[in-house]
Image (cartoon, rainbow, N blue to C red):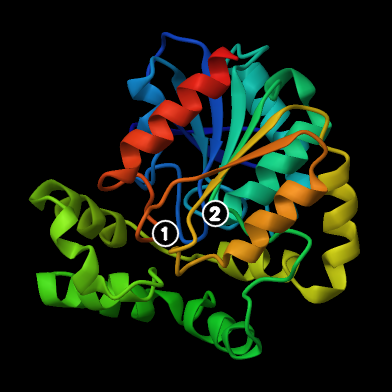
Amino acid sequence: MRTRVVGTSLGPVEVGISSEAGEAVVFFPGGHSTAATPNGADLYTELGYRVVTFSRPGYGRTAVGDLTAAEFVPAVAEVCAGLGITTAAATVGMSFGGLQAVHVATGLPHLAPRLVLHSCAPSSLPYPDGLTERLVAPLAFGPRTQRLTWRAVRLLTASDRGLRVMMSSLSRLPVRQWWSQWSRDDRAAARGIFSMMGSGSGFVTDLRQARPERSSYRESTLRSVPCPTLITASRHDGGVAFEHTEDLRRTIPDARLVETGAPSHFHWLGASRGTVSRTVREFFSA
């Protein structure tokens, strides 16, 4: 996806635009991802939509400081207005991008007549789920260390054996149970995703917003979502506990949950891609 930087009153914002034709879908990728990272937005381009993907605060060439999801909403509005996007088919959040998508849905309803949340956290529950993960994540993926971490990840995932090791952290199933379901293209796509990941300063900002002390605030925001919401997730996802999905379904007023059966956090790879695509198409046409 081609990216460009759009100036806003809050600073430059990096976006990727899939095409100049089609009804718009506003897409927010997850942690460690920029507008250029291939993490499932192409599901929407295949359905004929013009996807506008944002690098959230701290990621890529977006340089607006460590803004929260709520504080970034005015920049989203300015970018879309500058691109001539006055309405959209939906706003979509992937993983950690879900919180930004929720805030756009509550603050910019013209861009979110529908909301889609794919494998998202945090809900009103804190994230990461365990105390050890909460302590280690800022150290491994902080601004000063993340380059070394991702360099090691790229070296590891250069081989199929290393890729299997990495994917084992994103699945609750033994990799041997589902690895054969991935084609050579799926494995190449996963390797490509890891090769383009980086945490910048964005992941620390994400973690700050996911802390336990902000749970009440997140719950209040989720309860204020005004539009129909599709939630897709898998119980096998090793990146996001299914408890977040259940909490999102309980908390968002008009929410529908579809389990994808995906063997990992990468729901757009393998057989689950078709399930997600059909589910989105049906939701948009309802």
Asked if 68 appears above or below 145 in the picture, the reply is: above
Disc 1: CA contacts within 10 A as few (<14), some (14-19) or many (>=20)? many
Q: Amino acid at mark 1?
A: His
Q: Quadrant of residue 146?
A: bottom left
- The residue at the point 59 percent across, 49 percent down is 97
Q: Crowding near pointer 2: few (<14 within 10 Å), some, many (20+)?
A: many
Comparing 185 with 83, the one in front is 185
Q: Secondary structure at mark 2?
A: helix
Image quarter where the N terminus lies is: top left
Q: Which one is earlier in the sequence, the residue at label 1 or at label 2?
A: 2
Residue at horizontal 66%, vertical 65%?
A: 205
Seen from the viewer's position, the closer of residues 55 and 224 is 224
Instruction: State the mark number for residue 243.
Output: none
Q: Which secondary structure, mark 1? A: loop
Q: Nearer the viewer, mark 1 or mark 2?
A: 1
Q: What residue is shown at x 29% (from left), y 76% (from top)?
A: 174
Is residue 168 something one can see in this rendering? yes
Cα distance in 3D space between marks 1 and 2: 9 Å
In the drawing, what numbered circle is on residue 95? 2
The residue nearer to you, when weighing 50 against 183, is 183
Q: Residue at x 49, y 28 (%)?
A: 280
Contact between marks 1 and 2 (CB within 8 A): the answer is yes
Q: Quadrant of the C terminus?
A: top right
Residue 275 position within the rendered picture, expressed as x and y whole percent measured from the top left: 38, 36
Query: Residue 120 at what x, y percent from top left?
Result: 59, 53
Q: x and y percent of residue 13 in the render?
A: 58, 40
In the picture of the structure, the residue carrying the numbered disc 1 is 265
Residue 67 visible somewhere in the drawing: no
Name the amino acid type tagged 2. Answer: Ser
| Rendered image quadrant of residue 247 | bottom right
